[in-house]
Image (cartoon, helix red, strand yellow):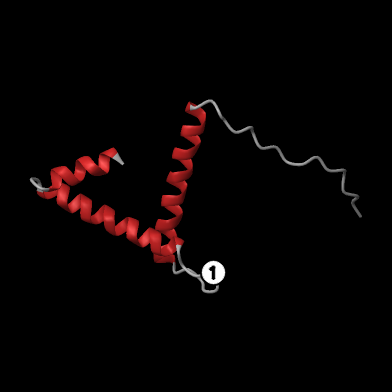
């Protein structure tokens, strides 16, 4: 969030900051469209991929915040099941 605000401030004076801000905003808009796509229809790949990448980054940030606040998630383990008989 702070980096985005700093980039917006730089965009008033620097061309590269304006371009970066526009491209980043467009990418976030496409990701939001993919995220909000109706469940009844298949999401086009051009929208699904940015949504997937943004969701993954949000999950990583959430995990880091949980870790830094002392609420780390336990390790996932598969459920214990009996042996499957073979034929």
Give the image quarter of residue 81. top right
* Of residues 38 and 20, the one drawn nearer to the viewer in this rendering: 38
Q: Residue at x 23, y 43 (%)?
A: 5
Q: Which residue is mark 1?
A: 39
Give the image quarter of residue 34. bottom left
Q: Is residue 40 above or below residue 14?
A: below
Q: Residue at x 35, y 62 (%)?
A: 30
- Give coordinates of residue 10: x percent, y percent: 14, 43
- Give coordinates of residue 18: x percent, y percent: 15, 51
* Of residues 56 and 68, the one drawn nearer to the viewer in this rendering: 68
Q: Residue at x 39, y 58 (%)?
A: 31
Q: Is residue 53 above or below residue 81?
A: below
Q: Secondary structure at mark 1?
A: loop
Q: Quadrant of the N terminus?
A: top left
- Give coordinates of residue 23: x percent, y percent: 24, 55
Give the image quarter of residue 44. bottom left
Q: Is residue 86 left or right of residue 2?
A: right
Q: Is residue 67 above or below residue 34?
A: above
Q: Residue at x 32, y 57 (%)?
A: 27
Q: Residue furthest bottom?
A: 41
């Amino acid at each position: 969030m702070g980096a985005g605000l700093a980039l917006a401030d730089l965009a008033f004076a620097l061309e590269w900051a304006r371009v970066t801000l526009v491209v980043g905003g467009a990418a976030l808009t496409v990701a939001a469209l993919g995220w909000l796509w109706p469940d009844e229809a298949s999401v086009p790949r051009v929208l699904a991929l940015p949504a997937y990448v943004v969701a993954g980054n949000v999950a990583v940030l959430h995990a880091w915040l949980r870790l830094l606040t002392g609420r780390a998630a336990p390790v996932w383990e598969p459920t214990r099941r009996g042996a499957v008989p073979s034929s």
